Amino acid sequence: MSALFNTYARRPIALVEGKGTIVKDQNGKEYLDFTSGIAVLSLGHAHPELVKTIQEQSEKIWHTSNLYQIPGQEKLAQSLVKDTHFSYAFFCNSGAEANEAAIKLARKHTGKHHIITFQQSFHGRTFGSMSATGQGKIHNGFGPLVDKFTYLPFNDVDALKSAIDDTVAAIMLEVIQGEGGVNAVTDEFAEAIQEICSENGILLIIDEVQTGIGRTGTRFAFEQTPLKPDIVSIAKGLGGGFPIGGILGTKELFDTFSPGTHGTTFGGNPLAVAVAQKVIDIVFQQDFLDEVKKKSDYFVEKLKAAFHNGEFKVKGRGLLIGLEGENEVAPAISKLEEAGLLVCSAGTKVIRLLPPLTVSYEEIDQAIDILKKVFV
Ligand SMILES: *Cc1c(COP(=O)(O)O)cnc(C)c1O
């Protein structure tokens, strides 16, 4: 009997070893890991550079708290804002906490607390981030929620326009809704959001927890849209498997957070920032990002060819890819697992493919073969 609270519908396997895209379970069976631990393992399992970084940093110093200067944190912040319109970073430990920081910053900066988010969004499980999430199934039983979030239909320009008034502090969205079904923002909607924010002095918060750090083929997914956020939240892929999250913000927001207004014990500790630094030193190289795009094009083309009879609609961007079908995906995920391919779901009818950004073309071919074997 398990002594764990029953918060997850866990698969019946335990992964005990991993290298790159390949993982092994307790019985020695091998799988292609196209979950990356839910978009976390940007560089795959046990990347030699990350192993070395953890080893070296852990021999120097792990943790000091933010009572002291942390040079690695300064450097990581500089690297993240370099060549962007952002000027400052704050580090925490997870995506939910990153969104908490974003919400607190937006509230304090504007002096308002009404935030518009979208149906099917996912922003996390803490009170603020859960309240921001536009899905009843995430809220059920936990009310009252934090005031005040309005959940609008995604990609509906008219609904957005009619919801804008002078109470609105911020609009918060994912460029591609990850958990909610791999739903991308349309150009038309992105343009409308940007215009509304600029004209009304409304802050734009983009949750890049899943889409950021190269996942969609650019450093941040918003770079492929007309959106210019005031704040982005990041986490998942940033630490490549080591827990770290954060926000990036524009210089106009600097004065809003002063000493004592926000903080966290673990956030940006020397070990976490050393690992994240190594991740972005690799992922933010233009060659690496271009290669993510090329692999994505290759993968999407093969998926479309494999499912040309309409078994699935292929959606997404970069290496955040959704296969949308007619049926519930849970049984399909078990079949793929049996055949040696691990995938996630997104919503109830979308299979979400999230290989490490370092996946090889050969591994993509192998995944295609398994998908064809199971579905075609
Ligand atoms: C996973 C996720 C979160 C929550 O991150 P945690 O690290 O689980 O708290 C928030 N937003 C998005 C878009 C996510 O995909």
Image (tube, rainbow, N blue to C red):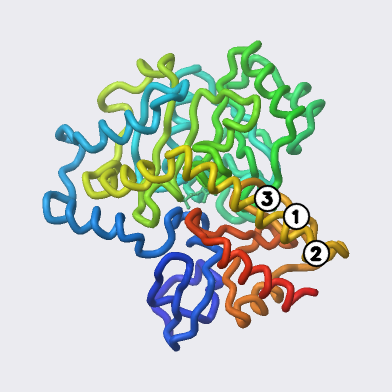
Label placed on residue 26: none
Question: Secondary structure beneath disc 3?
Answer: loop
Which residue is identified by label 3? 182
- Residue 134: name its quadrant: top right
Tell me which amino acid carries mark 2. Phe
Disc with the residue nearer the chain's start (3 vs 1): 3
Quarter containing the N terminus: bottom left
Position of residue 138 relative to residue 117, above or below, is: below
Residue nearest the viewer, comparing 361 with 171:
361
Q: Quadrant of residue 284?
A: top left
> Dot 1 corresponds to which residue?
314
* Other-residue count near label 2 (Cα within 10 Å), few / some / many at <14 / 14–19 / ≥20: some
Residue placed furthest toward the bottom: 27
Residue tagged 2: 307
Q: Residue at x 75, y 55 (%)?
A: 314
Q: CA distance from mark 3 to mark 1?
A: 10 Å
Dot 3 and dot 2 residues touching (CB under 8 Å): no
Task: Looking at this view, name the residue that lies furthest to the left.
Answer: 60
| Labels 1 and 2 touching (C-beta < 8 A) | yes
User: Would you say residue 148 is visible in this rendering?
Assistant: no
- Residue 6 x %, y %: 50, 71
Tell me: 4 left or right of 164: left
Q: Position of residue 82 (x, y in %)?
A: 39, 26
Q: Earlier in the sequence, mark 3 or mark 2?
A: 3
Tell me which amino acid carries mark 1: Val
Left or right: residue 108 compared with residue 243: right
Dot 1: within a 10 Å radius of its alpha carbon, few (fewer than 14), some, or many (20 or more) residues? Answer: many
* 279 relative to 375 in the view: left or right: left
Q: Quadrant of residue 150?
A: top right
Which image quarter holds the C terminus?
bottom right
